[in-house]
Amino acid sequence: MSISNSDYSKMTDKASPNSPIIKDCIKAFVFGGGICVFAQLLNFLFERLGLSEDNIKLATPSIIIIITAILTGIGVYDKIARHAGAGTIVPITGFANSVVSPALEFKHEGFVLGTAAQMFSIAGPVIVYGTATSVIYGLIYYLGTK
């Protein structure tokens, strides 16, 4: 028995609930903005404590990554993400979560073959692609300005 593409499309539309796009966008904006506001507050705090600009640039993302890793490890970050949707994919928090989640998922396989081997299963391709792209761009830039 074969089903035409249009019949299949009608069946999936009937079985799938519509998502509240406007509500989801507002939640993502509020949660993502909240993460950014928190990071800015950390910047202000570190500035008040007398840290140099370079140290502030290092401390703020480090604290955000540590908090995200801890919240992912204790299962809170996933609960926040269920409500916030794309708002939790603010680059640094989403990246930290994508490194910690697989590491936790495979910890039963041991430290080396589980946690360490799987840690970059999601984030690894992003790192490799970013590195390779920057090298290619650098070469093109170098050759173009020579």
Image (cartoon, rainbow, N blue to C red):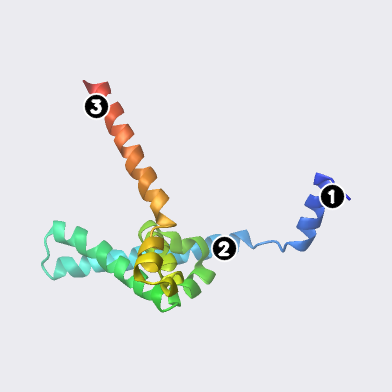
Task: Give the labeled residue for mark 1.
Answer: 7
Estimate the spatial distance between the alpha carbons at disc 3 and disc 2, rounded to whole Å.
Answer: 43 Å
Which numbered disc, 1 or 3, marks the residue that appears first in the sequence? 1
Q: Residue at position x 43%, y 57% from top?
A: 121
Which numbered disc, 2 or 1, marks the residue that appears first in the sequence? 1
Q: Nearer the viewer, residue 84 or 67?
A: 67
Q: Residues within 10 Å of mark 2 (few under 14, many from 20)?
A: some
Task: Point out the frontmost of discs 2 and 1.
Answer: 1
Which image quarter: residue 110?
bottom left
Task: Give the labeled residue for mark 2.
Answer: 24
Name the spot of residue 103 as percent of width and height, x first. 40, 67
Name the spot of residue 135 as percent of width and height, x first. 30, 36
Say what amino acid the circle numbered 3 marks: Tyr
Q: Are marks 1 and 3 in contact (CB under 8 Å)?
A: no
Q: Are marks 2 and 1 in contact (CB under 8 Å)?
A: no
Task: Give the labeled residue for mark 3.
Answer: 142
Q: Nearer the viewer, residue 52 or 118?
A: 118
Direction from residue 30 to residue 36 in the image, left or right: left
Above or below residue 86? Residue 8 is above
Tell me the element at label 3. helix
